[in-house]
Amino acid sequence: MKRYHFSITRSLFIAICMLLLSAFVLAENNETFARDWTLSDAAGTSLNYYADSNDSASVILFWATWCPFCRSLMPHLQQVADEFEDRTVKFYALNVWEDGDPDKYFQEKEFTFQLLLLADLVAEDYGVLGTPGLMVMDKSHRIVYKRQSGENDIDVKAAVRKAIQRVVDDD
């Protein structure tokens, strides 16, 4: 009986180790990539994300003029965009669930992000349920940072800066 118990315990231990190892391997290989999309700007010009951001780090912000959290975060993102303006980094502001005038808002605030309109379906495709939704992607469109609900603007700004810096330093 004792030998039988040892055999079961050893088998169970090996099974648990294999399960943990396989979970670790799956987690390491289960990278999340940003999907491609095509949207238009305020002038009606189409932009394809993969083609435009080829070989660039990119930041995608899902936002709306009525969102107080977006209005609070966007100046911080503009500061990061200004810091990296001479580097290969693209900033996209995808307007979602809008009832205002995003183009007018951008002009008034002098934001330099690429403004793209009617992005509701892209937000849905990315699993964005609220605003602001924010992601940083590397040059292969792998998501390297995703804003978590409740993160304050200063922490988001630092995390975006750090994620971009890691990507551009890999050049």
Image (cartoon, rainbow, N blue to C red):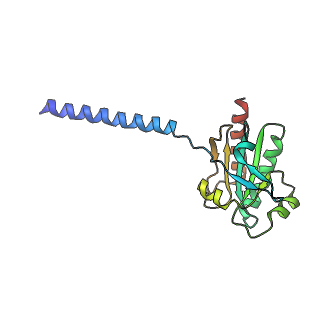
Image position, residue 76 (x, y; %): 78, 51
Residue at the (76%, 41%) spot, across then down? 89
Residue 50, compared with residue 118, is above or below; it is above
Image position, residue 26 (x, y; %): 46, 38
Q: Quadrant of residue 66?
A: bottom right
Q: Total number of numbered labels?
A: 0
Q: Quadrant of the C terminus?
A: top right
Q: Is residue 44 rendered to the left or right of residue 152?
A: right
> Who is closer to the viewer here, 71 or 100?
100
Q: Quadrant of residue 11?
A: top left
Q: Quadrant of the N terminus?
A: top left
User: Residue extending furthest bottom?
Assistant: 99
Residue 31, compared with residue 94, is above or below; it is above
> Who is closer to the viewer here, 107 or 79?
107
Residue at the (25%, 31%) spot, across then down? 10
Image position, residue 119 (x, y; %): 69, 59
Q: Is residue 31 rendered to the left or right of residue 114?
A: left
Residue at the (88%, 61%) spot, across then down? 108
Residue at the (78%, 69%) spot, across then down? 100
Residue 159, compared with residue 44, is above or below; it is above
